[in-house]
Image (spheres, rainbow, N blue to C red):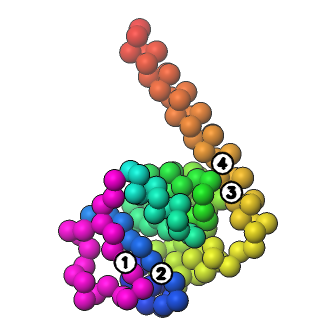
Amino acid sequence: MLFSVARRLQNIEFRVTGNPDRLPDETAVPPNVTLVGFLGPERFLSEMKESDVVVVLSTERESVMRTAMKRFEWKPLVVSKTEATLKYFPYALHAENTETSIAAALMSAIEEDNDLSLQRRAAAIEASKKITNAQTEELRMRITKLSL
């Protein structure tokens, strides 16, 4: 699906991470897409920091993508629209898993003005703190139960 979006938005460069064995052969890849495969932590973070927008898509309804969690205060974020992403990424641009919806969300992320970007960034930082605090509290409760 992302390749269809890339063909539609030929003036945008896409860099796609992930398992190279699951990617299509080179002939199916549009010219504005670079397949970077699996990346080590440092190169992965570097790729995200160098991007203008981070797009994280999933077909799993309860998926909370680790990539989306890692990019909080850096860039605008486009994610698949699910209950989980609406809950954990309220500041993101949510897209149905369709070519039209993903392309529209991506264009909105690119075109939004700086004030909106700053608002999204502030909301992302706040959401990150809430998630981290909730995870810490859950871990403490589990440790306490194990200690008893």
Mark 2–mark 3 CB contact (< 8 Å)? no
Residue, disc 4: 125
Dot 4: what SS?
helix
Quadrant of res 17: bottom left
Note whether 72 is above or below 78 in the view shown: above
For residue 13, the mark is 2
Q: Does the segment drawn in magenta span residue 98?
A: no
Dot 1: what SS?
strand
Mark 1–mark 4 CB contact (< 8 Å)? no
Q: What residue lies at 70% left-to-right and 53% top-to-bottom?
A: 123
What kind of residue is marked 4? Ile
Specify few, some or many for label 1: CA neighbours under 10 Å numbering under 14, 14-19, or 20 or more: some
Question: N-terminal of the two: label 2 or label 4?
Answer: 2
Q: CA distance from mark 2 to mark 3?
A: 23 Å
Quadrant in the picture for the N terminus = bottom left
For residue 73, the mark is none
Dot 3: what SS?
helix
- Name the one closer to the observer, 78 or 75: 75
Question: N-terminal of the two: label 1 or label 4?
Answer: 1
Dot 2: what SS?
loop
Report if residue 99 is visible in the image.
no
For residue 121, the mark is 3
The percent position of residue 142, horizontal first and vertical second, equals: 44, 22
For residue 34, the mark is 1
Residues rendered magenta in the picture: 20-40
The percent position of residue 33, horizontal first and vertical second, equals: 39, 81
Q: CA distance from mark 3 to mark 1?
A: 27 Å
